[in-house]
Every structure is written in structure tokens, then in C-alpha cells.
């Protein structure tokens, strides 16, 4: 066995923490003080609010520049993206604005007409005249109301069509982006973050694109037109009210600057709660076995405690906002009354104008509230969208050249590779694969053998050196070509939701059915596929016709038969072969390996024993290379291991 | 009064706390009643505050009308100031209580939400490994993540509806005393107005359901694509699955548009009807003004009330909808909360001996005290089942019963399917109960595990199965979750499991953070951390199921040697077929068709048992004879 140059646990004592030094998840400053004066309570509340604000800002900042995982785009990119989507839909946007403006305009005519009615009634006159005037006006209002209803219908309809169209384009774009992610990154990174993005973030984006954007446009139009209508009705009555409403602008701005960050923080606390609970549920048996119940319940309660703090922050923000807007949006009623009384006594305004002004003021607070709410929602949507568009910012990991390989000869030369800069995992490995041979790579974990496998299959490019097939660099091949040259066989036998055919033709999507059947026959699956209700057209995958683990693995093998690469890299530690189904699959596996060059990253020594050649990789270098008998005869690392295996 | 997050001691309570009352799971309605009773003081208070908050709407128009009549029209400055002053006070009162109300609403909502989440966590730990046997994981999670929100919404709508009812009655009183004729019209018209949209609601809901279905399908397709992304990028198929997604996305778009058109129709009808209602009101009212039965101020206040009346009625419809949805959620919650642990309530449990042989009657397997016993079988399920029995875990051979019914099921078919599920759930529960209450069939010394308390069993026998999971947190927490180890013990466990590289790879060493389920680690690293954690517990009996299946031969050899060494003198059972382990065993046992057929040392069995050779040599692949002859020739 190789001895380690330095003790990996050298820093152990420094990083170990005493059990009692654990900090509470919610700092003591965030707990309200008890038994103190009202003034102190208020100052304490202010302190807590500021502290919560800092926590929210920190969480938000962290979510914008994640240490790990996929990048996040900045807001400019999001705006450009949406501007692009809108630019493609000029005529829809025009109709959206026009119809909504007309609908809002019609709604604003009614209060004026009611005001006129009041004026006529107050002026008096002969009863019969009054009644006929009333009837006329009533009919006119009915007419306007009908028009308003029709316009509302059309405006809402175009909003829906527009919102849905925008949304479907956006999400299809996102999925296309995901499907273009560079191979090297996909193989390396965990998919959890990506799953969150295509589910939760797409959901949030949906809400803001589908409802938020049209609603914001509509509310904005309504507010704008209302202001115009109020001014047309009576400048004297309108100006004080508008000033009062405008006075809330400062607080609204303050709120809008802070709230979205608060909501994003809140959202992240909920996904945290969810993650912890998922772990507890899925690990229920582990929890029971190790008596972790108290800890898991505690972890869940801690998450909720943190979430409650985030909720308190946005609650206070909203309360601060409501304080101002409840007064600013509701007191114009009183102002209208006072100014109206004054103006009426001076003869500047009529009772009808006062009535109309009241109705305008009453109906303005709805769209104003909605406008603030939608601005909120839009900003949260922008944050989600920026995470989605971040996926598109992952740089390409290869540039396809035009050269095509001449033959299946695979050679790796002087390979160096590092996951972290300055920490090479491979130190100048060279391997020349004979066409059709079976090469086993053995070595302890962390020796770099899996990395070597990834380089040999073209998933990553080496830092220096080259892996060439038929004289062409693997990373200079287009992916479609690469897949038919070399394939990495991993344990993933994910069955996609789709037909059996969809699940098999992956590498050559235009394969004829005969090819699919041949592949299925080769892995011994023809029988059970024929027995499925719709044969190749049967839907499989989660929620559909379910497959046994062995069948799922056969499907995965059939995919590779269709791809038909001349070289296979088999990472055994993560290989397809599940011990439970190993026996039934042996034949299928042999059918796949037959006639191909195979590099097996061996985990079980029998694989090495059966191989034509064995490479022993230790600390990123090939220490021994040769046949089983050669290496046993050399009496080195491999021989020692072999003795342990067979003794 | 309760604040959020609520303290919950139901289903599971920490030592020293009295267990809280269990929810009423007899019917969904009973469950919801229990839920509302749980926080009725907050709900009652927010009802009262809600009434105060709505004062500007309920008495505002009245005051405005008075101001016009007694102030403006009467040319009385003092009259105007008096009524306007009152109106201002009402506005300020409304605004102030608006804040109080908002605070209370957030509180009731979050008590409901967090309370449900806490109940779910506690139920999960109370049930342990039994729950996943009976219920799909996804359904447990969805009670916490989405149904909890419905319960929060229910508490909010309950208090809002109650306060709107009071407001409605106040307004009814005002309008009826002002003008009986117009008052009756208003009180009747408001429900008619909202009711008029009802026939449109049904087709809308149907379409919304289709839209939701297609959207969730779309989400699962996206998840599916990401889950299989390595395959899609590694082997291909981007075009096929990209196209499938686009098609589904377009289906979802069409469903959304068709639901949206009904929504638009409902809004238009609302505009039309409420417009016509106001015209009718104005027409009647103006006639009364002309006839001198009504003042102009009263007419204007009626206009204000006409705008208000829509809200309470809408709220009542919302209440009906939310109650329906809460009932559905309650049914799902009951499907989780009604489970009871099957274990017998042992009044006099027999304590287990600290050191003794462990014997399984069904297979005839014995783990001798202080020995390393390795169980070999060609069928991994058999050894896994044996390990489960040794640790008193119910067998993992049941199919969980889902609550979700298929999409197309409606009416009677749905009821029948639900009844079937119910019966199946009851059958599973009864089966567990039966298994848990009879003699278990595994003895530690003379004590049957069924006669001991479950806690005692868990303390004595630790089974680390292949499903053992890591939790998010620091590496220190992963190895030493209880905080009982010294640094030396933790280091030792890490070294025995040969997991030093995990320490090295994590920035921050012991404080390095593992992602949920140890996601950032490789399969082999995860397995070794799990092993280190199990070793650190230092249980009297340790059962390791396939502990090194994802580890390479070099490392496996090291681990086998070190584990055998560190567990020397303590009862240890390992299931594996790897020769690297086998020659460290004090005793090897071959399991065939679930029963022990031969036992002895590895060398003995290789020599004497063809069946054993068959199983073990398979893992070595090379015919044993050839290997040994090769070895002999070297000697």
C-alpha cells in the first residue's frame, strides 16, 4: 500500500468545534425583550427590523453570486430578455395597451355621467322634465356600461393570450438553454440547483410574466387615465387629492426597494424548510436507527424559526407601507369633501363634480394597491428570471473543429488535469489504447482514475496534453460525432417520460424502428417490449408504464447500442450493473461490449483479471501497466492487492 | 395568545415536555374544526379588528352623505367640518386597525402553516421507518409544503368572512333605515350579482383544472429533463425531449388561454351587472330625490355602499371555495396524521443483555458474541431481509398506498377508488400491527426483540443498511450528530472508514459543509462517511449491509482490515461477497433461499462447499482452482 506523504487530518484539531459553542440560529437580539417600557420596546423593534433587513440583504446578495452551482445573470440581462420578447410582439402589445386603455376609459366615463345626473337633479325643474332627463341619462349609462363590459372582455382576452404566449416562449427558451449546457459542467455539477430553477423559478417567473406584466400595464393605464379624468372633472378637487396620494410615493419607493429582497429571502427559507423535511422523510430509517429524532425535529424547528424572522421582516415592511398608503389613499375622501364644500360655497364646483370626484377617489385606491403589488411581484419575478438566464451564461467548454477522425485509434498523451487551479489530479498520464482491447484501470479512490476515464471519453478536456481519436482531439469534435466515437457508461439508467422509442434513439434520433428492435434484441429486451400495450409507442418513465430495474438498465444499454461507439469507458464504481440484477444483465452487457474497445475503471478485481491489460493508477500517475500475469509477476501494487483478494 | 411559530408537542415531544393533543382525524370536517379551535383566540380577535378596519367603508359613505346634506348643501361650514372631521377620524381608525389586522392575519396564517409543517416532521419521526412503507414520500412532503398553506388560508378567510358578515349587517342596517326600498334592493342585488357569475364558474374551473394538470405535467417534464441531463448531453436526445417539452408547453398555453377567456367573460359579466345595478340604484334613488323622499347626500352615500356591497358577497364565495380546498387538503393531511406506530405498548419490557449471541430463528443464523460474522448470499435481498430482522425493522416488501387518484377518475369511480385505497391502507396498518405484536423471532441472549422496548433494541443493535442517509450540515455533525465524541474518537472513526479524503476535500475540515443527502460527495465517499458514523456509535451489536459496495478494491481492503481490527471483541455482522472482507471474518455464513446452509471460516468453506465457492468465486470471476494453482506455482 502506498503511504501518505502528509496526514490529511493534520488540521483536524483546529477545525473541530466544542459542542457547547454552537450558536443559536436566531441571534438573541432578534427576540423581543420582556418587561420593559413601551419606548424601549419600540426602539428594540426598530433594532430588530434593521437586523432582519441586514439578514435579508445578505441572503439576497448570496443568492445573486452563489459560491457553488450555476451562475446568476444580472438584471440588465433580464430586461434585455424581456425587451426582446416584447419586441417580437409589437402588434400584441399595441392591442393590449389600446383595448385596456379603452376599457379603463369607459369605466371613467360613468362617474362623470353620474355627476351630471346629480347636478340636474339638484337644479330642479318640472318633474316630468326631470324624469325624462333621468331616463335618457340612465340609458346612456347603460350603453356605456355595456361598451365597458365588452371592452373589458376583449382587453382581458388579449391580456391572457399575450401573457400565455410570453410565458410559453420564455419557458421553452429556458429548457432549450438547459439542453445546451456544456457536457463537462453537466457531468460535474449536481443537478439539485438546476431542478430548483426549472421548477420553482419557472413557477415564479410564470406568475409574473403571465399575470404580473399585463396587470402592471393595466393598473398603470387605469391610474394614469384616472388622474386625467379627475383633472378633467375638476382641477380644484383633483390637485389636493393627487398631491396627497403622491405624498405616499416616498414610502412606496422605500418599500419597493426593500420588499423584493425580503420576499426572495422568504422564498429561500421555505425551500430550506422543504429540503430539511425531505431529508427527514427520506432518511426516516436512518433517523430511527441513530436516534436522531430530537435533532431532526430541532433542525426543522430551526428552519421555521429562521423563516419566521424573514416573514416578520416583510410583515413590518408592509405595515410601514400600509401606515402611509392607508392614510394617503383614503383621506382624499375627506379632502374632496372639504375642498368641495369650500369650492361649492364659492361657486367653483358643482355637487355633480364633487360626486364624480368622490367616485374617482374611491375607485382609484384599487388599481393603486394593485400597481404596488404588481411591482413587487414583478421584481421577485425578475430575480427568478435572472437565475434562469444565468444558466445561459455558462461558457461553452469546447469549440467543434472541422477535422474528422481517421479510424478508431484512441491515444491519450501527457495528460494533466485539475478541478481546482494548482491542484493537478493527473500528472502526465499517457495511454495508447489498442483497437478492440480491454484495458482495466485500478487504483485507490482519489488516485485520479475516474478523472482519467472522463478525459478518455471526451467529457472534459485535459489541462495540458491531448486525447485524440484517429488523430483528432476529442474535445474538437461536435457532440453528435463524439457520442458515436466514445461513450462513458455510468450508472444512470434514468428512464425518461416518453415512448420506448424516444428513450432509445437518443444518440441517433432519426433511427428507423428496425434499428431500435435490433438494439432491443441485442440486450435481450425484445420480448418484454413486444408485450407492452403499444410496443415501441408505449409511454414509460415516471408516472407511466413502470419498468423493473433490470428493464430500465436494458433500456440504458440499448441506447448505447444505438449510439454504437467504437470505444466504451466503463466506470465500474458507478456502472450500470446493480448487484441485484447483475446476473440477468450479464448477457446484455456482453452484447454491448462485444467488438468494442473497452476501458474499464475497475472496482472489482475480477474485471482486472479478465482484461487484456491493466493500468494501476496511483496519485495521478500510471505506476504499472501490463497483463494480469505480467503485473502479478512484477510483484508490485497490483500483485499485493491480488493476493489479498484471493487469499 | 399564540404567536408564530407555534410550539407543537403533538406526535413527538422532547423529553420533559408533556405531549400535545393529537388532531381529530375522524373526518376532514372534524380535522378542520380541530385546526380552527387550535387558534380561535387569534381568529376571534382578528374578526373584531377586521370590523374596525372596515369602518371607512361601512360608515364612510354615510358620513360623506351627511356632510353633503348638512354641510355643503346647507352651506354650513361647521356642519361640513363636523362630518368631515368624523370621516377623518374614521379613516385614521381604519388605517390603524388595518395594521393591527395585517399583523394578526399574518399571525393566524403562519401559525396554521408552520404548525402543519411541525406536525408533519413530528409524525415522520414518530413513525420512523414504518411511514415510508405505507405512504409515498411525495405525499408526506406535499402536506407540509402545499396543504399547510391551505390551512393558513382557511384561518385567514374564516376571520375575514366573519368580519365581513358583521360589516354587511352594519351596512344593511344603515341602508334599510335610510330607505327601505333601496335598502332591500341593495341587500338582494348584491348576492344576485355575485351569483350571476356562478354558471360561468363551472366551465372556468374545469378549464383551470386542465390548465393546472398540464402545467404540473410540464413541470415534471422539466424535472425529468434535468434529472436525465447527463444522459441527454452525454448520449443525446436533446432534440426529442426538447420537442416533447415544447409540445407540452404549447398544450399548457392553449389550456391557459381557454381558461383565460372564461375568466375574461366572468370579469365582463361582473362589470356589466354591477354597472347595471348602479344605474338601477341611481335611477330609483334619483326618482326618490325628485319626489323629495331622499336627500342628495343620501343618494351619494348609496352610491358608495353600492361599491362596497360586492366585497362581503365575494368573500363569502371565497370562503366556500377555500373551505372546499381545505377539505381536500384535510383529507390528505389525515392520510398522514392518522397513522399510528404499530409497536406494542410494553408495560413490562424486558431489558436486553449487553453481551450475548444474536440468533434469528427464521434463517437459523447466529452472530456469536464478540465475533465478526460475515453473511454471504447470491441474493442480496435475502441478506438485507436478514439484517432488517436482526434490527427489528418491518420488512421492506410493501407497496406504499398513494392518496392521489388517477386524473380521469370522477364521481362514483373516484369514490370507489378512494374506498379501495382506504381499505388497502387499513390492511397495511393491520399487517404492521400483526408483525409488530407477535414474537419477533430474533433473540439477543434469551430475550426476544419483541419483548424489549424499541428504544432498547435501537441502543443495542445498529443496522447500517444500504439506504443509510447523510444529512446536510458540517462534517462534524455528520460523524458526531449527537455531540458525544471527542476529537480523537471522531478522527479514529474517519480513519477506520478510510474517509480522510472527505475531510481533505471539504474546505473548512470538520466545519466543511455537506449538501443535503451528501449530494456533493461521490458515492464511495458517501458510503465511507456513513460507515464512519456507524462505527463512531460503537453499538454493542453492529450490522453492516454491503458497507463497501461503492468503494474500489484498494480502499475496500484497507477498510475491511481496519473495521475487523476496531470491532475486535464486539459482535459485528457484515453482509458482502467480497473476498477482501471474507478472510477477516471469524465466521462466514452462507445463506441459501433465506436459510443458513453452511458456516465456517472462509478457507474452510472455499475448500468444502461448492455452493459457497459458486457464490464467492462469481465475485472473483476467475475459477478458484485456477487462481489457487497459480498461487501454488508461485510458492
Image: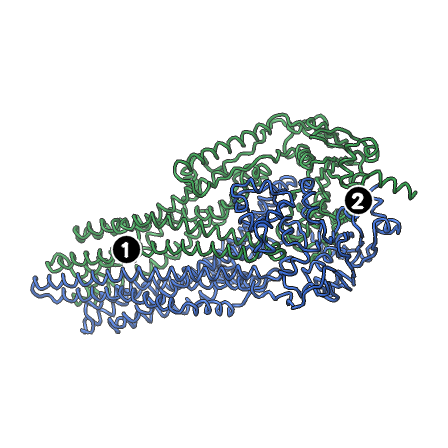
Chain colours: A blue, B green
Foreground: A381 or B86?
A381
**Residue located 55% across and 66% down the image:** A73
**Quadrant hosting residue B71:** bottom left
Q: What element carries label 1?
A: helix
Disc 1 to disc 2, C-alpha distance = 78 Å
Q: Where is residue B449 in the image (x, y as percent from the top left)?
A: 66, 29
**Quadrant hosting residue A356:** bottom left
Q: Do labels 1 and 2 share a chain?
A: yes
**Crowd band around label 1 with a 10 angstrom C-alpha radius: few (<14), some (14–19), many (20+):** many
Residue receiving disc 1: B269
Letter of the chain that mark 1 sits on in the rendering? B
Foreground: B54 or A97?
A97
Q: Is mark 2 on a helix, strand or loop?
A: helix
Residue receiving disc 2: B562
Q: Is residue B601 left or right of residue B471?
A: right
Q: Is residue A621 left or right of residue A160?
A: right
Mark toward the start of the polypeptide (1 vs 2): 1
Q: Where is residue A363 in the image (x, y as percent from the top left)?
A: 29, 62
**Crowd band around label 2 with a 10 angstrom C-alpha radius: few (<14), some (14–19), many (20+):** some
**Residue located 75% across and 52% down the image:** A445
Foreground: A492 or B630?
B630
**Residue located 31% across and 61% down the image:** A154
Quadrant in the picture for the C terminus of chain A: top right
Amino acid at each position: 500500500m502506498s503511504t501518505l506523504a502528509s496526514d490529511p487530518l493534520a488540521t483536524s484539531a483546529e477545525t473541530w468545534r466544542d459542542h457547547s459553542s454552537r450558536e443559536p440560529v436566531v441571534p438573541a437580539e432578534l427576540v423581543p425583550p420582556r418587561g420593559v417600557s413601551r419606548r424601549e420596546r419600540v426602539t428594540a423593534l426598530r433594532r430588530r427590523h434593521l437586523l432582519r433587513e441586514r439578514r435579508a440583504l445578505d441572503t439576497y446578495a448570496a443568492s445573486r453570486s452563489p459560491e457553488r452551482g450555476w451562475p446568476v445573470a444580472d438584471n440588465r440581462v433580464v430586461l434585455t430578455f424581456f425587451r426582446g420578447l416584447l419586441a417580437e410582439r409589437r402588434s400584441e402589445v399595441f392591442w393590449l395597451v389600446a383595448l385596456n386603455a379603452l376599457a379603463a376609459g369607459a369605466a371613467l366615463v360613468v362617474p362623470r355621467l353620474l355627476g351630471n345626473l346629480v347636478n340636474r337633479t339638484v337644479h330642479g325643474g318640472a318633474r316630468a322634465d326631470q324624469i325624462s332627463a333621468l331616463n335618457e341619462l340612465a340609458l346612456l349609462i347603460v350603453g356605456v356600461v355595456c361598451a365597458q363590459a365588452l371592452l373589458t372582455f376583449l382587453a382581458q382576452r388579449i391580456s391572457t393570450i399575450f401573457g400565455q404566449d410570453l410565458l410559453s416562449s420564455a419557458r421553452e427558451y429556458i429548457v432549450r438553454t438547459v439542453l445546451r449546457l456544456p457536457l463537462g459542467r453537466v457531468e460535474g455539477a449536481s443537478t439539485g440547483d438546476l431542478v430548483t430553477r426549472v421548477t420553482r423559478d419557472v413557477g415564479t417567473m410564470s406568475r409574473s410574466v403571465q399575470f404580473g406584466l399585463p396587470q402592471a400595464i393595466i393598473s398603470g393605464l387605469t391610474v394614469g387615465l384616472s388622474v386625467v379624468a379627475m383633472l378633467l372633472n375638476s382641477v380644484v378637487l383633483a390637485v389636493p387629492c393627487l398631491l396627497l396620494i403622491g405624498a405616499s410615493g416616498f414610502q412606496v419607493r422605500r418599500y419597493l426597494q426593500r420588499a423584493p429582497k425580503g420576499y426572495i429571502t422568504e422564498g429561500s427559507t421555505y425551500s430550506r424548510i422543504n429540503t430539511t423535511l425531505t431529508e427527514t422523510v427520506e432518511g426516516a430509517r436512518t433517523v430511527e436507527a441513530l436516534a436522531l429524532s430530537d435533532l431532526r425535529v430541532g433542525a426543522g424547528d430551526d428552519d421555521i424559526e429562521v423563516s419566521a424572522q424573514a416573514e416578520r421582516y416583510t410583515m413590518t415592511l408592509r405595515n410601514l407601507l400600509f401606515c402611509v398608503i392607508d392614510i394617503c389613499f383614503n383621506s382624499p375622501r375627506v379632502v374632496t369633501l372639504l375642498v368641495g364644500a369650500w369650492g361649492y360655497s364659492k361657486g367653483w364646483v358643482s355637487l355633480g363634480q364633487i360626486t364624480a370626484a368622490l367616485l374617482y377617489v374611491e375607485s382609484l385606491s384599487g388599481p393603486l394597491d394593485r400597481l404596488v403589488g404588481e411591482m413587487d411581484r414583478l421584481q421577485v419575478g425578475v430575480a427568478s428570471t435572472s437565475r434562469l438566464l444565468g444558466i445561459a451564461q455558462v461558457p461553452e467548454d469546447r469549440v467543434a473543429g472541422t477535422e474528422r477522425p481517421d479510424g478508431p485509434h484512441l491515444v491519450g498523451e501527457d495528460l494533466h488535469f485539475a478541478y481546482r487551479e494548482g491542484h493537478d489530479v493527473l500528472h502526465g498520464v499517457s495511454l495508447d489504447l489498442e483497437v478492440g482491447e480491454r484495458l482495466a484501470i485500478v487504483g485507490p479512490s482519489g488516485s485520479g482514475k475516474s478523472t482519467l476515464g472522463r478525459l478518455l471519453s471526451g467529457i472534459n478536456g485535459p489541462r495540458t496534453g491531448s486525447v485524440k481519436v484517429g488523430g483528432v482531439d476529442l474535445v474538437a469534435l461536435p457532440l453528435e460525432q463524439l457520442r458515436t466515437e466514445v461513450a462513458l457508461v455510468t450508472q444512470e439508467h434514468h428512464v425518461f417520460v416518453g415512448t420506448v422509442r424516444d428513450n432509445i434513439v437518443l444518440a441517433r434520433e432519426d433511427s428507423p424502428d428496425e434499428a431500435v428492435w435490433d438494439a432491443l434484441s441485442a440486450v435481450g429486451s425484445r420480448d418484454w417490449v413486444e408485450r407492452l400495450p403499444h410496443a415501441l409507442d408505449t409511454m414509460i418513465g415516471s408516472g407511466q408504464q413502470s419498468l423493473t430495474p433490470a428493464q430500465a438498465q436494458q433500456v440504458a444499454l440499448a441506447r448505447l447500442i444505438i449510439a454504437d461507439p467504437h470505444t466504451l469507458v466503463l466506470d465500474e464504481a458507478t456502472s450500470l450493473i446493480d448487484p441485484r440484477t447483475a446476473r440477468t444483465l450479464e448477457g446484455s452487457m456482453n452484447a454491448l461490449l462485444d467488438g468494442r474497445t473497452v476501458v474499464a475503471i475497475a472496482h472489482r478485481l475480477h474485471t482486472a483479471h479478465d482484461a487484456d491489460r491493466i493500468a494501476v493508477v496511483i496519485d495521478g500517475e500510471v505506476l504499472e501497466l501490463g497483463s494480469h500475469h505480467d503485473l502479478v509477476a512484477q510483484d508490485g501494487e497490483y500483485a499485493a492487492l491480488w493476493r489479498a483478494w484471493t487469499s | 395568545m399564540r404567536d408564530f411559530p407555534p410550539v407543537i408537542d403533538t406526535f413527538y415531544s422532547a423529553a420533559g415536555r408533556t405531549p400535545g393533543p393529537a388532531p381529530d382525524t375522524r373526518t376532514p370536517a372534524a380535522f378542520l374544526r380541530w385546526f380552527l379551535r387550535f387558534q380561535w383566540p387569534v381568529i376571534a380577535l382578528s374578526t373584531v379588528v377586521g370590523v374596525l378596519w372596515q369602518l371607512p367603508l361601512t360608515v364612510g359613505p354615510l358620513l360623506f352623505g351627511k356632510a353633503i346634506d348638512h354641510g355643503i348643501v346647507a352651506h354650513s361650514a361647521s356642519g361640513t367640518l363636523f362630518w368631515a372631521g368624523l370621516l377623518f377620524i374614521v379613516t385614521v381608525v381604519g388605517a390603524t386597525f388595518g395594521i393591527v389586522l395585517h399583523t394578526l392575519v399574518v399571525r393566524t396564517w403562519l401559525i396554521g402553516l408552520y404548525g402543519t409543517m411541525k406536525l408533519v416532521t413530528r409524525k415522520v419521526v414518530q413513525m420512523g421507518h414504518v411511514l415510508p412503507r405505507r405512504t409515498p414520500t411525495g405525499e408526506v412532503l406535499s402536506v407540509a409544503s402545499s396543504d399547510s398553506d391551505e390551512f393558513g388560508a382557511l384561518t385567514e378567510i374564516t376571520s375575514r368572512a366573519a368580519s365581513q358578515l358583521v360589516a354587511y349587517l352594519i351596512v344593511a342596517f344603515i341602508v334599510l333605515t335610510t330607505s327601505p326600498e333601496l335598502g332591500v334592493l341593495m341587500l338582494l342585488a348584491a348576492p344576485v350579482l355575485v351569483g350571476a357569475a356562478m354558471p360561468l364558474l363551472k366551465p372556468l374551473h374545469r378549464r383551470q383544472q386542465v390548465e393546472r394538470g398540464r402545467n404540473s405535467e410540464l413541470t415534471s417534464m422539466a424535472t425529468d429533463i434535468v434529472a436525465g441531463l447527463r444522459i441527454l448531453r452525454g448520449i443525446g436526445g436533446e432534440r426529442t425531449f426538447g420537442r416533447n417539452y415544447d409540445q407540452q408547453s404549447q398544450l399548457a398555453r392553449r389550456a391557459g388561454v381557454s381558461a383565460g377567456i372564461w375568466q375574461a367573460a366572468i370579469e365582463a359579466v361582473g362589470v356589466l351587472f354591477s354597472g347595471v345595478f348602479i344605474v338601477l340604484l341611481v335611477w330609483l334613488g334619483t326618482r326618490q330625490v325628485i319626489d323629495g323622499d331622499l336627500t342628495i347626500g343620501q343618494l351619494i352615500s348609496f352610491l358608495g355602499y353600492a361599491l362596497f356591497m360586492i366585497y362581503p358577497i365575494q368573500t363569502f364565495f371565497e370562503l366556500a371555495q377555500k373551505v372546499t380546498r381545505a377539505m381536500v387538503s384535510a383529507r390528505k393531511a389525515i392520510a398522514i396524521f392518522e397513522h399510528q406506530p404499530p409497536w406494542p405498548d410494553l408495560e413490562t419490557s424486558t431489558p436486553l443483555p449487553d453481551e450475548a449471541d444474536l440468533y434469528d430463528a427464521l434463517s437459523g443464523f447466529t452472530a456469536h458474541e464478540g465475533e465478526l460474522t460475515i453473511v454471504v448470499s447470491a441474493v442480496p435481498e435475502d441478506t438485507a431481509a436478514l439484517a432488517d430482522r436482526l434490527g427489528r425493522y418491518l420488512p421492506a416488501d410493501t407497496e406504499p398506498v398513494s392518496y392521489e387518484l388517477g386524473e380521469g377518475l370522477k364521481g362514483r369511480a373516484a369514490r370507489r377508488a378512494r374506498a379501495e385505497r382506504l381499505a388497502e391502507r387499513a390492511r397495511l396498518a393491520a399487517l404492521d400491527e400483526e408483525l409488530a405484536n407477535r414474537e419477533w423471532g430474533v433473540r439477543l441472549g434469551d430475550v426476544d426483540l419483541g419483548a424489549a422496548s424499541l428504544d432498547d433494541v435501537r441502543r443495542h443493535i445498529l443496522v447500517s443498511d444500504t439506504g443509510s442517509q447523510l444529512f446536510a450540515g458540517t462534517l462534524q455533525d455528520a460523524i458526531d450528530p449527537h455531540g458525544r465524541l471527542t476529537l480523537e474518537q471522531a478522527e479514529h472513526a474517519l480513519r477506520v472508514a478510510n474517509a480522510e479524503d472527505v475531510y481533505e476535500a471539504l474546505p473548512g475540515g470538520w466545519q466543511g459543509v455537506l449538501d443535503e443527502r451528501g449530494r456533493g460527495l461521490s458515492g464511495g465517499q458517501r458510503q465511507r462517511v456513513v460507515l464512519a458514523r456507524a462505527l463512531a456509535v460503537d453499538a454493542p451489536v453492529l450490522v453492516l449491509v454491503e458497507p463497501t459496495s461503492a468503494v474500489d478494491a484498494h480502499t475496500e481492503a484497507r477498510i475491511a482490515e481496519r473495521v475487523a481490527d476496531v470491532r475486535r471483541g464486539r459482535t459485528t455482522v457484515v453482509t458482502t461477497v467480497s473476498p477482501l472482507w471474507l478472510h477477516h471474518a471469524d465466521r462466514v455464513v452462507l445463506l441459501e433461499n433465506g436459510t443458513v446452509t453452511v458456516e465456517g471460516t472462509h478457507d474452510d468453506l472455499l475448500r468444502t462447499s461448492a455452493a459457497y465457492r459458486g457464490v464467492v468465486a462469481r465475485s472473483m470471476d476467475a475459477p478458484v482452482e485456477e487462481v489457487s494453482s497459480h498461487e501454488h506455482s508461485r510458492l
